[in-house]
Image (cartoon, rainbow, N blue to C red):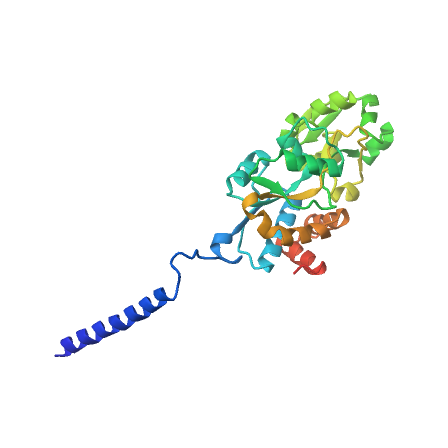
Amino acid sequence: MFTARRRIVAVAAAAVIGAFTLAGCASSNPLEPETAGPGTETDTIVVGSQSYYSNEIIAEIYAQALEGAGFTVERSFQIGQRDAYVPAIESGEVTLFPEYTGNVLQFFDPETEARTSDDVYAALAEALPENLTVLDQAQASDQDSYTVTSAFADAHGLTTIADLADVDETLVLGGPPELAERPYGPIGLKDVYGVEVEFKGTGDTTVEELVAGTVNLANVYTADPRIETDALTVLEDPKGLFLASNVVPLVNVGVADEIADVINAVQAKLTAESLVALNVQSTVDKRSSADIAAQWLADNGLS
């Protein structure tokens, strides 16, 4: 009898559950699509970064700004160089990446003649594949330069890249390995300025090797705080070998409109001076990218 009574209770419970289920189904429209807000898995924004501390800091700022706006964010940092991460952005594996207008323009259009900030930004929008776009460019730039020690500059009277043609000793250029094939690398130096160099791939130790004298000319980003702390001189580029390279978000078009307001607000506050200060916090103060980003967002009223 106990077993029979338990079976009856179970059947009754199932009937009640079924009734609630039917009621729930009746109150909803089966043809109406499910919607998802910024904080759901379907709207996860994957933010990438290069293997470069300054780029990772900007990526972390983007990530935290988006999280503060309610988006779900996944970080895919330290990916590497453009040959590695651009395909990931094009495929949608990565959806947002801090870039630099001039360098990424030359990646897609090596023959571009754009040089000024506005011209480069306009040309970039035209050169991108149809599934990629850019949001607002920042005033901040972190572009390539040819840099020497201040002592070397003084000894040879160097102010511009053109002055290198008069140096009476062998010029050894240090930089990332891929510089050897870049339009502004050794080939560009010779074509634009008539300067011949030997090339040494120095990677992450470029500035250290410049200071040590292993190389006497180096490809250094202009927001590198060691330009000041290690007494380096950035040579002027009157013929525009290097394109203007402002910080710009490279975005998969599928999420561009959704995140534009958040990221453009960041871009509006990102100045050249603030970028150098962010880099100092990383290289000198040894703070994490997450802590640097959190303080910057708070200081700029964006958190």
Query: In the rendered view, does 51 fall on the left or right side of 281?
Result: left
| The image quarter in which residue 175 lies | top right
Q: Position of residue 42 (x, y in %)?
A: 48, 53
Looking at this rendering, what residue extends furthest in the left direction? Answer: 1
Placement of 294 over or under 237, stated as above or below = below
User: Between residues 34 and 8, which one lies in front from this camera angle?
Assistant: 34
Quarter holding the C terminus?
bottom right
Residue 119: image x %, image y %?
Answer: 73, 35
Q: How far from the left and from the top, in percent, is residue 58?
A: 65, 48
Which image quarter is the N terminus in? bottom left
Judge whether 216 appears above or below 27 on screen.
above
Q: Residue at x 57, y 37 (%)?
A: 130
Is 88 on the left-hand or right-hand side of 185? Answer: left
Q: Is residue 208 visible?
A: no
Q: Is residue 217 visible?
A: yes
Relative image position of residue 54 (x, y in whole percent): 67, 45
The answer to whether 17 is drawn above or below residue 223 in the figure is: below
Q: How many marks?
A: 0
Quarter residue 150 falls in:
top right
Q: Quadrant of residue 161?
A: top right
Residue closest to the eye, 240 or 38: 38
| Camera-nearest residue between 47 and 264 | 264
For image coordinates 39% across by 63% down, the residue present is 28
192 lies left or right of 297:
right
- Asked whether 261 or 51 is in front, the reply is 261
